[in-house]
Amino acid sequence: MRTSVRRTLVLLSAGLLTLGACASEDTDPDRASSDGYPRTLENCGRTTTVESAPQRIVSLNQGSTEILLSLGVADRMAGTGTWTDPVMKGLEAESAKVERLADSAPSMERVLQTEPDLVTASFASTLGKGGVGTAGAFADLGVPTYLSPAECEGKDNEGDDDGARTGVLEIDAIYREITELAELLDVEDRGDELVSSLQDRVAAASAKAPEDDVSVLYWFANAESPYLAGCCGGPGIITRALGLKNVFDDTKAEWPQVGWETVAERDPDVLVIGDLTRKSQTAESAQAKIEFLESNPVTREMTAVKNRRYVALSGAALNPSIRTVEGLEQVADALAEFGLSQ
């Protein structure tokens, strides 16, 4: 954790140890007395308990934010942070109701200023050492936390990179995130409806899978040493649903950095490229990626480049989230446009 965060925790701990009590004073008394509270669940090796239905939620990643907005709890959110893209279509009005604490990761001090009664995140790099703050640090201040199961189950997050999968991520982990958040927030019916809708969309998109073998590569960002999807993270859900072959399915690293010579040797039929609006890496936008691919002598002779088989997905769709379903639909539609499926 950053030194400034440690210092802030020391200075503020005396006043903020009562944070949960302060937040509960603002809670709707009818909702706070709802049956079934306190509610407890096991989350990423920790126990998360909410004493009443949270009313001042802070979500630290876009994926977590979009689940909460889809569950209809914008009026119970105190802030959001760490965005890679515009909010998912259909959620613009709800998102506008919630304060954006930072486009990137907010400081722990900024999060604590909102007096949160629940902090959620999609990534261990955000809710962990070197990120906004650890779950333990928030717990010491009386603030419960929730981390996406997709980030901690079947995944090793040790080291400075994006981690590696020890198992294959399935879309059920995303469904579980929805249902568990809905349980904590006392909106189980909305959670069930959202999961059912996503399941229907996955089934419809999967039905468009090509009959012949099609190879694919997923490029998130960075032109000098590109971050490409390994076998078993969010893009793997898309790959398996459509019966595709990820040319880097021989690595379990989440987003390994691979040289362009190796990429050209693997020569995928289709390139799925991140179309990001953030500006922390080179070649963030899809257009910047395409310009690089078509001008670089190593990549411009690749099959996908010569045939301009590009599928631009948001960063949120390439990460494990409800947007993964959106990404699946876009890839399925693009394959049909390329004449690679019906």
Image (cartoon, grey):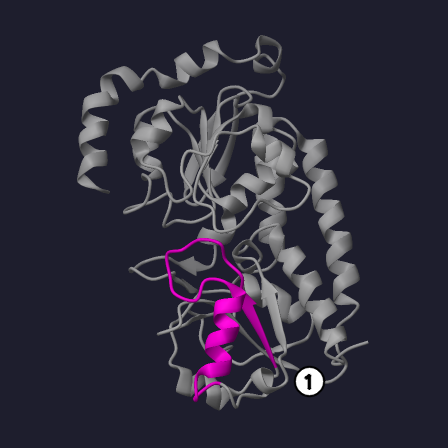
Judged from this view, the residue extending furthest toward the right is 342
Up the image or down, 224 lies above or below 40; here it is: below
User: Is 285 one of the magenta-colored residues?
Assistant: yes
Q: Secondary structure at mark 1?
A: loop
Which x, y percent locates residue 190?
70, 34
Up the image or down, 175 lies above or below 255; here it is: above
Which x, y percent locates residue 44?
44, 45
Residue in the image at 43% along x and 84% along y: 296
Which x, y percent locates residue 317?
58, 57
Give the camera-side residue of 295 and 195.
Answer: 295
User: Is 32 one of the magenta-colored residues?
Assistant: no
Give the camera-side residue of 302 and 263.
Answer: 302
- Residue range of the region highlighted in magenta in the rendering: 270-299
Q: Is residue 115 left or right of residue 213?
A: left
Q: What is the number of callouts on the image?
A: 1
Up the image or down, 84 lies above or below 135; here it is: below
Question: Is residue 130 visible to us here?
Answer: yes
Q: Is residue 42 left or right of residue 336?
A: left
Question: Is residue 230 visible to us here?
Answer: no
Residue in the image at 71% along x and 42% along y: 194
Up the image or down, 215 lies above or below 5; here it is: below
Q: Looking at the rendering, which quadrant does residue 245 occupy?
A: bottom right
Which x, y percent locates residue 248?
49, 78
Locate the C terminus and report the quarter of the image it occupies.
bottom right
Residue in the image at 41% along x and 33% along y: 101
Q: Looking at the rendering, which quadrant does residue 297 occupy?
A: bottom left
* Label 1 Cα neighbours within 10 Å, binned few <14 / some 14-19 / many ≥20: few
Locate the N terminus and report the quarter of the image it occupies.
top left
Residue in the image at 47% along x and 59% along y: 154
Give the camera-side residue of 298 and 141.
Answer: 298
Q: Which residue is mark 1?
A: 213
